[in-house]
Image (tube, rainbow, N blue to C red):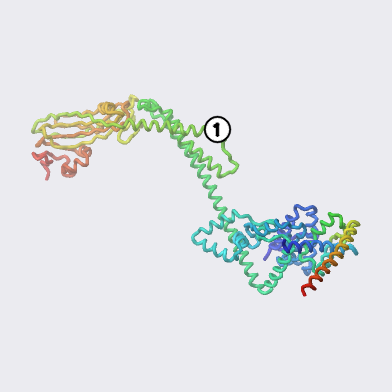
Amino acid sequence: MNKTVSINLSNFHFFIDEEAYKKLRSYLDRIKASFAQEQGGDEILQDIESRLAELFNEHLNDQAQVITLKEVNDVIVIMGEPQEFEIDEEPTDEKQSKRTDYKKLYRDGENEYIGGVCAGLQHYVGINVVWIRLIFLLLLIPGVGFWIYIILWIVVPEAKSTSQKLDMMGKPINLDNIEKKVKEGFEEVEKKVKNVDVKEVENVIKDKSSRFFKSLVTILIKVVKILIKVLGVILIISGASGIAATCIGLLMWSFLDIGVDMAQIFEQLGYQLGWISIAAFFLISVPMYYLIHLGMRILSRQFKGHKWPAHIILAILFLGSAVFLSTIGIRELQEQKKVAEVNSVELIQTQVTDTISFEILNNHKSFDWNDDFDLNFNDVEIRIGKDKNGFLFSEEVKLTLGASRNKQNQIKIIKTARGKNKELAEKRAKNIDYQLKSNSNITLIPSFFTSPIENKVRGQKLKLEIRLSPNTYFKLDQKVYNKITYENRRRLGLKRGEMINHTLFFNEAYELKCADCN
Amino acid sequence: MKIENTKAQMRKGILEYCILSILQEHPLYASEILAKLKEVKLLVVEGTLYPLLTRLKNAEILEYNWEESKSGPPRKYYNITPKGASFLAELHETWAELKQAVNNVTKNHHEQNS
């Protein structure tokens, strides 16, 4: 079933089927193009149209019959292609040789299978199109050929005008060509008569596969276009939400009322919260802004964005923020350069017969602080007391247990901190507040230490070394056990199940023994 | 020198001369001119005629009149202008001379060869 178009050719009315109409249309366009430069070109076209009408009338049995591709082809053979009309200007020898010697590469839309690339190459290279198509098919296997074909399709123009077609074929414009064409035409007619069915079938297949490939490519292009738009939307959404999140985050810092003056806390730590917030804002939101920008560009080609001064200002803000924040970072690192330890030793006063109990003083619940606020840097936290002043707080208290070699029961407190130089580090270590407490035979070990906020978070740590003389009995509870380093536990052979809350002692060989274990 | 050039130039001149000769007796429209030219196998594609007619008209060698037709739209009947008539007379002379010259040359040539 074919669609039929109704046309008016020089005041004659015809029905023509769609394929035939396309062919006729392009034929008339070619004639029009070839006479476009000429005086009276329109008149020539009108005369030719009226002759075409006459020829169609001769070829059709009655007026109601539909013009098919066959009639159009027959009429074109009679009338000839526009380049065959020319016997007019005498071509100079140079022009001739130029036309003959230099072929140009065009896509051949008349003999196309997919895009006319192979057929165009056939004219250019002079190899039968079948071989070229075969080569492309072989190249298609590793996928290289596909891209070469696509590139050639895009790069090589289709031969549309008459002179381009001649350039493609590499034939000169003259009367001799007309003869050739006519001879070819006769041969073609002969061939057509001989294998009418084969040709027909081939054409149908060719047409269908060509259409299939064309629509496949159209669909692919559409899919890619849609994906690009989706990408644009994603960019805009992520950019916008990035900026929104930054704003909300920074506003929370400034406006969320937790009864704490953040700016003051930061100032005590040596930072200016305001500037850091602004720098952080630009550092995050400038790239986010450009994500949105990119997304808009993808969605709409008209979107131009700002002029260059705006871009420069944004770039300066971004770079300035980056430099500012990295300076702070570098300063932080420098202040962590040196480590210092401060030791002090406390003796445990006991009678020889007593059993010393070690217990953890877990009284930070009794500590008066704001529970809403907790700024945690690894092991050291910043906390706010009820007096609204900040202080440093850490549970980084480690215990080791061992036999004393100097017959004294003692606890060595080792405070560690970092600083720009040894002196500063030592000063910080000294500023760690830690007090052991004892209650008759019970030694209370606080589970945490504190330090004034001015000391800043500088890797503060605390280590307790409990050294007990041989044959001194002692007890450990579960919490104390938890504070003992893993390595120390292993070395002593301290086992949770058997030894917690039992009476323990070191023998003369400095080995840990249990006095009342089963 | 290309043989195609020579042939084209010869054909071009002869085609114009023949069209004018055909129109000498009475006005004709394009299809009738085509029929006559095809009879003598001077034309291979019909398209060649139309630009030629238009150019001859533009050169004021031909003119046309619209005449009603029984079987369709009006037709352009081409006619020779006075200027065309004198042009044709010149062509007649030239052709006669050429024919004589060519005949003599080719005849002598053939005789020499044989």
Across and down, in percent, residue B27 comes to 89, 62
Q: Nearer the viewer, residue A14 or A23?
A: A23
**In the rendering, at what x and y percent does residue A94 appear?**
70, 56
- Nearest the eye: A411 or A210: A210
The quarter in which the N terminus of chain A is drawn is: bottom right
**Rendering quarter of residue A279:** top left
Picture quadrant of residue A371:
top left
- Vertical placement of A176 versus A356: above or below? below
Residue A420, x across and y down, in percent: 31, 29
From the viewer's perspective, tell me whether residue A473 is left or right of residue A164: left
- The percent coordinates of residue A157 (x first, y second) are 63, 55
A492 on left or right of B63: left
Q: Which residue is mark 1?
A: A309
Q: How many marks?
A: 1
Label 1's element? helix
For image coordinates 82% across by 57% down, the residue present is B54
Q: Quadrant of residue A271?
A: top left
Q: Along the line of sight, which residue is nearer the eye, A294 or A450?
A: A294
**Chain of the residue displaying label 1:** A
Compared across the picture, whether A115 is left or right of A386 comes to right
Quadrant location of the C terminus of chain A in the rendered image: top left
Residue A374 visible, this orientation:
no
Other residues around mark 1 within 10 Å, as few (<14) / some (14–19) / many (≥20) = few
| Residue A275 visible in the shown view | yes
- Looking at numbered disc 1 in the image, what kind of residue is underneath it? Pro
**Residue most toward the top?**
A387
Residue at the extreme front of the image, as rendered: B112
